[in-house]
Image: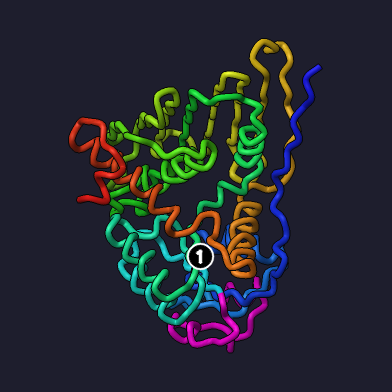
Amino acid sequence: MINEPQLDYLPKKPSKCDYGIGLIGVGGIAEIGHIPAYLKAGYRISAIADPIKSRREYAQNVIGLGTENQYADHRDLLNRSDVLIVDITIPQSSPNKISVVYDAIDAGKHVLIEKPIAMNYSEAKGVVTHARKKDVKIAVCHQYRWMPVYRSIKNLIDQNYLGELYFLSIDERWDYDLPGSYDKQSQMLLMMQTVHFVDELRWWTGVEPRQIFASLSHRPNQHIAGESIGTLVLDFDKNLRSVYVGNVATHSQSQHHHIRIEGTGGIINAQHNDLWAPGSLEYSKVGAEDLWYRPELKGESFIDGYIGLMGDLMDSITEDRAPLVSGLDNLKTMQVIFAAYKSAELGRAVKPSEIDSD
């Protein structure tokens, strides 16, 4: 008789959750992700900053903030003594994102920053180094770690259900190819989506990739300026390999994530085809493939992800530890991403350590 593993995947309430949060940028991802998550969790949004008046008015209507808690200039928000955490949701390609991050660090605020920290490795490393000098914490928005299906995979791996891992494959598709949306962003697939799964792979396995081979391309007649299609082969150690296939210019408005993980003791198949749904997975022991467990996952992926992410940052402040997706940890993910770009350019495998030495 094989006992079914216990899955513990819903985000936990932080031990202290009344830290004041200041949001810098309240459009786009903040509107559909960060704000609804914080309101659902009961986190305290103390103030917002955004140069666009209509977005500030949205915050007033949805969050219930009066005009005295809304700012056109982020520096006015940073002067608030009741704001301990600053959540920066400015888009990756914005030219002033890095300067805003430095302003927040210099103001002594702990920072949650949308991925990637920066569009090149040296800038990202500079931000992390500066935060350490100022003794503030940085967490990076890799909210997938708290989404039900991906956290369930981590549960199974940590319980040694799969035995020794030797193969992980990820097939991901989105449709970002909308006129006017990403026609000026020269780095696309790897920075927007692949980066999440590199983070997941590192987190699931607890092992750093030794080298990466990547091939990148574009769909004909696409609107996206950067790469839209890519394949990565990641070598972790002598027995562990991972293959990632991604396409963000597919002819479909829906997302598509298929994951297969194989170990010496078991197998996982997982799907996540709706950003808001918890996803699904099945798993079986080697030698008992006629018995598949298919638990009914609960939760709301996109919202749960941000609840767990901010909750962990709050706990890291209370417990005086590094956040799980700290800036320092994220630099290892960024090394892999920039190694993939370099591999595609040079046509050879690249070690992540080559990026830090450039």
| Residue at point 43%, 66% (across, down) | 90
Q: Position of residue 193 (x, y in %)?
A: 43, 44
Q: Position of residue 221 (x, y in %)?
A: 28, 37
Front in this rendered view, residue 175 or 94? 94
- Residue 314 position within the rendered picture, expressed as x and y whole percent measured from the top left: 62, 66
Left or right: 121 with respect to 300?
left
Q: At 48% across and 30% down in the image, what residue appears?
A: 170
Residue at position x 73%, y 43% in the image: 8
Q: Residue at x 69, y 52 (%)?
A: 11
Sort mark 1 into few (<14), some (14-19) or many (20+) by Cα contacts within 10 Å: many
The residue to which callout 1 is attached is 112
Q: Residue furthest right?
A: 1
Rendered position, 124 above or below 339: below
The reply to whether the magenta stretch includes residue 322 is no
Color theme of the render: rainbow
- 30 displayed left or right of 15: left
Q: Quadrant of the N terminus?
A: top right
The three-letter amino acid code for the residue at tag 1 is Leu
Bounds of the magenta segment? 57-84
In this rendering, is residue 195 above or below 66? above
Question: Where residue 152 sits in the image (x, y, percent)?
Answer: 66, 38
Residue 62 or 315: which is nearer the viewer?
315
Which quadrant of the view contains residue 33? bottom right
Asked if the magenta segment contains residue 73, the reply would be: yes
Mark count: 1
Q: Seen from this angle, which residue lies furthest left? A: 346
User: Height in image: 313 above or below 61?
Assistant: above
Dot 1: element = strand
